[in-house]
Amino acid sequence: MTKRIATSRRQFIQLGLGASMGVATALTMPNAYAKAVQNPERRIAFKNLHTGEKVDTVYWVEGEYLISELSDINSVLRDHRTDEIMQMDTQLLDQLHQLQQTLSTTNPFEVISAYRSPQSNAELNENSSGVAKKSLHMQGRAIDIRLSQVALADLHGAAKSLKAGGVGRYSRSGFIHLDTGTIRSWGK
């Protein structure tokens, strides 16, 4: 039997408001978004390029996140340098699910970086100007990905079209950054 995450009254009300906003938004958004909102389950697949680990799972069913599946996702998206695991923001997973729906693909996201421990982030920040000191990666709210058989420009454009958080394009490294922060975009 699959465990489900219990929600408090406040979370339930927030989810209800979000759902009603989602339905209203679905009426004005592209068909892929409308389909994602109305779908009774959400599936997502990842391949961690550093560890070779994969997960392909339904993580949300009829309005509830599935604990064991989220745990599997968190494990694959852990900091590969320290093996530390962080609970990834479910809003980020939902953005990724919507992105797959928008692109009409079920290919797994190839993960360059997801959760980063403060130690890993500090080390990366010392060696690169492209790593923020207060990165959302440290909160489980950001991911760097690519998607096989999808051009980087198309992936970046589709992610920006969601208007759901930060989207950066790193053409030389061949990936995009996606996060649940404020809506913004960068890169060409």
Image: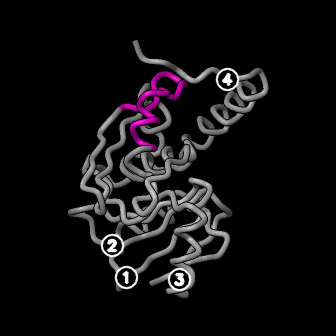
Q: Is residue 64 magenta?
A: yes
Q: In the image, which is nearer the foreground, mark 2 or mark 3?
A: 3
Q: CA distance from mark 2 to mark 3?
A: 18 Å
Q: Amino acid at mark 3?
A: Gly
Which residue shows up at 56% across the image and 80% down it? 125
Question: In the image, is residue 89 above or below residue 146?
Answer: above
Lower position in the chain sequence, tag 4 or tag 3:
4
Residue stretch in magenta: 58-74
Q: Is residue 108 magenta?
A: no
Lower position in the chain sequence, tag 1 or tag 4:
4
Q: Mark 1 highlights which residue?
A: 171
Which residue shows up at 32% across the image and 45% down it? 45
Lower position in the chain sequence, tag 2 or tag 3:
3
The residue tagged with tag 3: helix, strand or loop?
loop
Asked whether residue 31 appears in the rendered view, the answer is: no
Q: Mark 3 highlights which residue?
A: 130
The location of residue 38, given as percent across then percent down, is 47, 31
Q: Mark 2 highlights which residue?
A: 152
Find residue 91 and report its image quarter: top right
Q: Amino acid at mark 2?
A: Leu
Q: Mark 4 highlights which residue?
A: 7
